[in-house]
Image (cartoon, rainbow, N blue to C red):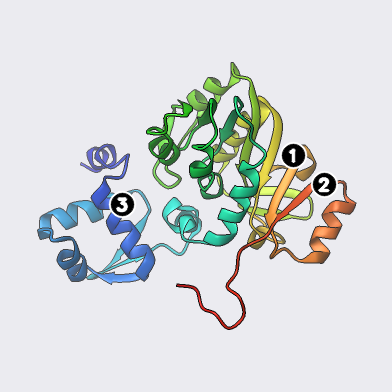
């Protein structure tokens, strides 16, 4: 029965994604609140919650549903999408300015690369290669973009395809620019929590003429389990203006080509809407 549920829930339905977003936003939610908010029967909500629990996205404690305080939860695309939104958009805008008409670019599963989507739709004759199901959905209707989606084993946590099929699909390609992100940067090394995700990122990097790392300033001076790459393996590293100036100076002294995106902020005395 559990196997059947995992098959049913491999790609999150719109309703389950809504439940996950709501629980992620509130932290702890009574099941009764979910019944009322989503107008579901108890059998339906129990079935949805069982799938989400089986995928490691939420946890059920008595009558409450909560997000998981672990690597899987913090790595979830739902969680990441809500973090450092302004910083990621500023980085994405600067990154997209490097793309020219007619380019073939690769975007990984990261929410920072995903923030490039709207700007890339404005560039004519562009080809985008990605393992991100979310980006495929967003760029699919864009008539100016030729879209190549990489298959493989689907990861609900990252909303992306990974594994040997994904990696092999990239090997025959030639890409002008690859935009990838990392979970953490310590010194001059980029890290990520999950080996399968690293291999997908490395595959995109290996066939690219130019490699660009996208990393918001929160990720510096932190570390994750697995090494992704040395920063020197990237042609450009883009971050936001929240980076510690001393850290930025050390990176430049190490020969890293660092570009810093300015994050729009409300003027003093004004509050954002």
Q: Which residue is mark 2?
A: 256
Q: Which residue is mark 3?
A: 17
Residue 56 lies, with reference to residue 100, above or below; the image says below
Quadrant (top left/top right/bottom left/bottom right) for the C terminus: bottom left
| Left or right, 236 with reference to 249 | left
Name the image quarter holding residue 202: top right
The residue under the point 65% across, 42% down is 97
Quadrant (top left/top right/bottom left/bottom right) for the N terminus: top left
Q: Earlier in the sequence, mark 3 or mark 2?
A: 3
Residue 192 in view, yes or no = no
Q: Which mark is residue 234?
A: 1
What whole-number distance in Å separates the C-alpha atoms at marks 3 and 2?
Answer: 39 Å
The residue nearer to you, when weighing 135 against 145, is: 145
- State the image coordinates of residue 234 (x, y, percent, origin top left): 74, 39
Label 1 environment density (alpha carbons within 10 Å; few <14, some 14–19, many ≥20): some
- State the image coordinates of residue 267 (x, y, percent, origin top left): 61, 75
């Amino acid at each position: 029965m559990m196997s059947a549920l995992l098959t049913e829930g491999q790609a999150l339905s719109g309703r389950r994604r809504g439940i996950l977003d709501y629980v992620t936003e509130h932290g702890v939610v009574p099941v009764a609140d979910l019944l009322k908010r989503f107008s579901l029967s108890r059998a339906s909500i129990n079935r949805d919650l069982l799938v989400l629990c089986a995928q490691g996205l939420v946890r059920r404690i008595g009558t409450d549903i909560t997000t998981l305080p672990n690597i899987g939860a913090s790595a979830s695309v739902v969680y990441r999408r809500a973090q450092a939104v302004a910083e990621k958009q500023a980085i994405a805008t600067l990154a997209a300015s490097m793309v020219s008409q007619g380019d073939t670019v690769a975007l990984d599963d990261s929410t920072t690369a995903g923030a490039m989507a709207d700007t890339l739709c404005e560039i004519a004759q562009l080809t985008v290669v990605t393992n991100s199901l979310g980006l495929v959905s967003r760029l699919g209707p864009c008539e100016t973009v030729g879209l190549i989606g990489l298959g493989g084993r689907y990861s609900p946590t990252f909303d992306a395809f990974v594994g040997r099929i994904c990696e092999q699909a990239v090997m025959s390609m030639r890409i002008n620019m690859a935009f990838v992100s990392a979970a953490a940067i310590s010194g001059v090394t980029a890290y990520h929590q999950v080996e399968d995700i690293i291999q997908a990122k490395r595959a995109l990097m290996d066939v690219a003429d130019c490699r660009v790392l996208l990393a918001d300033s929160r990720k510096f001076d932190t570390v994750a389990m697995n090494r992704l790459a040395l920063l020197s393996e990237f042609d450009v590293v883009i971050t936001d203006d929240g980076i510690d100036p001393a850290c930025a100076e050390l990176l430049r002294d190490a020969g890293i080509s660092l570009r810093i995106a300015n994050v729009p902020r409300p003027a003093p005395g004004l509050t954002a809407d």
